[in-house]
Image (cartoon, rainbow, N blue to C red):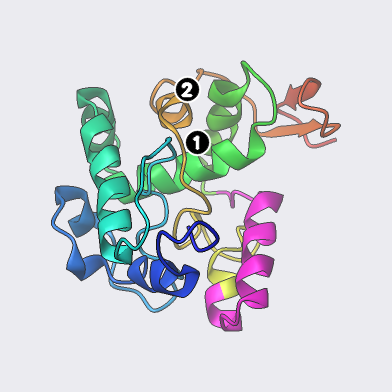
Amino acid sequence: LDENGVCSADDFLNACKNKDDYDYSFIADIPNSTTIAYPLEGFLFPATYDFEENMTAFEVVDTMLGAFADRISDSWRAYCTDNNMTMYELVTLASVVEKETLGEGVAERIASVFINRLDNGQQLQSDVTIDYGNALRENGFSDEVVFSYNTYKCKALPSGPICNPGVKNIDAVVNHEDTNYFYFFSYNNGADFYFTDNYT
């Protein structure tokens, strides 16, 4: 956005911190917490946009939020209701799934691992949340904020989404496989994933 003269990077990031500037129903689900780095992260829908030069950051962010609002499905709402989750929590979990999913056809199974852990009272313990926290630290956020995203330290979900997940990975959470898996690993090649119910 900055390099193409749409709006400045700083203005955009600041706009992503000000949830009260926007009028969408899902905004109400975003907690008022000082540990959330960018309250609107997760809802900036990843798509191709036609932006003009010299737009305001508000206009850019509002366009992306509107794209997310247009894609909210009845199945997402029903899943949240049936599982006592907010849309914010659903998107937060989907963001972790998205970052963990390197290949095709495994998102629903990865989602099942994390849901099984949450249902069992375990920590998510997802390395990708540490990567996000490290990026926040590099951008000047406090240890309190950084640690709130570290799923080896926090009790359950990180304090917010760690990316802006697409429809496919939100659907993967909603339509997750029914498994007894609690662990998985891959060789980071996007193809070979291994799932198990046993840590050893």
Q: Decide which of tag 1 and tag 2 comes sooner along the chain.
A: 1
Q: Quadrant of the C terminus?
A: top right
Question: Is 146 rendered above or below residue 168?
Answer: below
Q: Is residue 1 left or right of residue 143?
A: left
Q: Amino acid at mark 1?
A: Ile
Q: CA distance from mark 1 to mark 2?
A: 9 Å
Label 1: few (<14), some or many (≥20) within 10 Å? many
Q: Is residue 23 left or right of residue 9?
A: left
- Residue 118 percent location from the top left of the image: 50, 44
Tell me the residue that label 2 is attached to: 176
Q: Which mark is residue 115?
A: 1
Establish if 179 lies above or below 131: above
> Residue 159 in magenta?
no
Secondary structure under tag 1 reads: helix
Res 99 → quadrant:
top right
| Residues at marks 1 and 2 touching, judged by CB atoms closer than 8 Å | yes
Residue type at mark 2?
Answer: His
* Residue 96 as seen in the image, left or right of residue 82: right
Element at label 2: loop
Magenta stretch bounds: 122-145
Mark linked to residue 85: none
Decide: few, some or many residues near mark 2? Use Cα within 10 Å; few <14, some 14-19, many ≥20: many
Quadrant of res 175: top left
Q: Residue at x 50, y 55 (%)?
A: 156
User: Where is residue 78, by image quadrant?
Assistant: top left
Residue 105 at x, y percent in the picture: 61, 15
Task: Please indicate whether residue 133 sits to the left or right of residue 20 in the image.
Answer: right
Residue name at image x 47 percent, y 22 percent? 176
Residue 181: % across, % down: 64, 26
**Residue 13 appears in view:** yes
